[in-house]
Amino acid sequence: MKAQTTPTAALSASTETLLQLTDVVKHFPVASGGLVRRAREQLRAVDGVSLQIRRGETIGLVGETGCGKSTLARCITRLHDLTSGTVSFAGQDISRLSARELRPYRQRMQMVFQDPYGSLNPRRRVGSIIADPFAANGLAKGAERKSKVLELMQLVGLNPEHYNRFPAEFSGGQRQRIGLARALALRPELVVCDEPVSALDVSIQAQIINLLADLQVKLGLTYIFIAHDLSVVRHVCDRIAVMYLGRIVEVAETEELFRRPRHPYTQALLSAIPTPDPDLVNGDDRIVLRGDPPSPIHLPSGCRFHPRCPRAQGRCELEDPALGHPDPSDHNHVVACHFPVEDGEALTPGRQEQQ
Amino acid sequence: MSLLEVDNLCVTFATPDGILSAVRGLSFAVEQGETLGIVGESGSGKSVSTQTIVGLTQGARVSGSARFEGKELLGMSDADLRRIRGAEIGMIFQDPLSSLHPHYRVGWQIMEMIRAHERVSKKQARQRAVELLGLVGIPMPDKRVHDYPHQFSGGMRQRAMIAMALALNPKLLIADEPTTALDVTVQAQIMTLIKRLQHEFGTAVIMITHDLGVIADMADRVVVMYAGKPCEFADKRTLYHQPHHPYTEGLIGSLPQHGRRGSTLKSIPGLPPSLLRVPPGCPFHPRCSYAMDLCRVEQPGIVEVAGGLDHRSACWLPPDAVGTAPDVVMRRHRAARAHGHDERIPVASTHDESAST
């Protein structure tokens, strides 16, 4: 059994920073309603994110729909241009590079998408889809290219005999393997996985998670892992960053985050996970948040979470909290909250009143 | 008499590629006020079976029986079925956006639901719609009743669907993946809501889901389905702690569990079979790590096993080998070897499952 693959990878994870995000902002203009088209409003999808990603680690990005996690992923891989801020990859600021200058960096970071049905061209054969990165970069021609593709198919657990098949002939899990083979073609250092297993059935999901872990060890990959299924994130990631309305509200090592969430939002999010064990069902001490996240066009004043926060006080409405260390001894744990949840404080006051 | 008794339900569809057997012999009963969970992966027949019960599968060949309070539902006339659907059996589906008509106001749709079954004035119906929206926790229901579905968020739409399903106080609620499209925080809200309403009105619930976490929270008893057949029946505690069927064992092993971060998940190799070409014998045998000679030729019947009260499983393994403890797994392997188990690890089957999805 190759147990404990990720932790060993974590140990070997150097302290070298592979990716440094500094105050990344991505706004999308939206037309405002009304008869006269007045000044356009901004949808603030990502609104000031700073994060450091170390070589060899798996960092999870979690949050509700619309919190900006996928937009952030696309900013990192430069599929979106940034509104402001910088993304440094291996020490080089890539956020302002032209398409041509960006080329070598594109080879070093790749993306795997959620929808295994939508991300593969249905009219092209699998072999040629996986060969795309070679073609785009003019690498490995002819027989050499084919042998590399076959090797990749083997690497991700596809039968190389299926080289000439179409995507429609594969199941969801196998298509996700095809997407992964394509992403790994140029031996990237960083792979951004945007919900790689959410569209798959549980038994297939486990196969892909195991595959991702194996590949990380074999190829020394760094992963940014986006998922809304927190039990999967907990299983896969070394560190987790929690996002809410375009901001990171908490970052910590996985077990630390699950054991001692300091942000009330993280606490609510974690308590909402249904536990697949009838004896540990957390239905009774589940923190049910009121309402839905506010619109990223009209953000609340002060702390963005205050309208839904059970701990909110006057200050939260006025002052936007910055990321800080709640525990001076743990430099890996940062949280953006005026009144972080203290150690051992299990339930939030709002919840206790209800009971 | 149970509220709903389903007996040997079979559903097949004629497709250009041949006969597709979506459900192949499903029997279960739902008692008043309880929650029955149906778990399975895509293509296991979990949705088709309940849709057939309420007469929503068109062009299917159906056999077996489904009695609701003693009345046979299969083969009932459309007019009679319509009287039962909505009034006696409420339904919630996975995707609330496609279940609500985009052209009509949410309140109007709830009113129509009430007025289709009861003789009430428009004013009374509107009053009821507002009350229902308030009951499911929609803020300012007297204003939101005039909104269109697109003005609601995903969670609110699902709440509106629940309001509609409960409008006539049905005895049975069929919830088909009601929280799958929602965020965990909203999922928690919806699950709490369904439990609260069930408690208030004593409604029985059939909860269809692929998420074992949701089942652990909501269900009393569980049916596990695979390739159109039930493979295990148990109360939820027995199912999680003392599974008998290797498929259930595999499903539970596939879940990332606390405290085992980074360890290799016990995934189930291969893919579910195509429902056009279901393998002979036990449909799970090509993926099963205990498959014996018998499994390849003969379908196991559903028999009583040792886990708990009314614990039944469709598997040839010894009925007392329940659980996932290492000694039980050893015993199962010994039993399998004694009956012609092939030592090689089951290989991922290479055929496409696209036909089945």
Image (spheres, coloured by chain):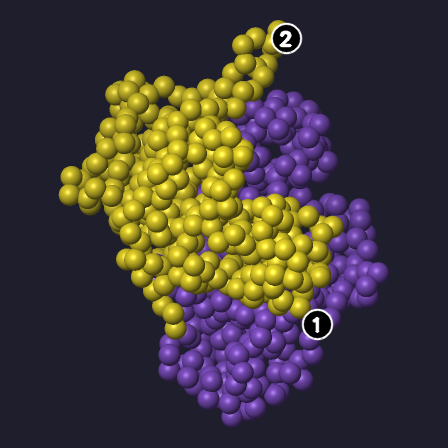
Specify the amino acid type for callout 1. Val
> Chain A is shown in which shade?
yellow
Q: Identify the subunit bearing mark 2.
A: A
How crowded pointer 2 is (Cα within 10 Å; few <14, some 14-19, many 20+) is rated as: few
Q: Is residue A158 above or below residue A290?
A: below
Between B176 and B9, the one nearer to me in the picture: B176
Q: Is residue B208 visible?
A: no
Specify the amino acid type for callout 2. Leu
Residue located beneath label 2 in the image:
A35
Direction left: furthest residue: A329
Residue located beneath label 1 in the image:
B278
| Snapshot quadrant of residue B153 | top right
Q: Residue at image x 71%, y 61%?
A: A164
> Chain B is shown in which shade?
purple
> The N terminus of chain B is located in which quarter?
bottom right
Taking the image as shown, residue B3 lies to the left or right of residue A334, namely: right
Question: Residue B315, how many percent across, how many down?
Answer: 56, 79
Q: Residue at image x 32%, y 43%?
A: A17
Q: Is residue B132 above or below residue B22?
A: above
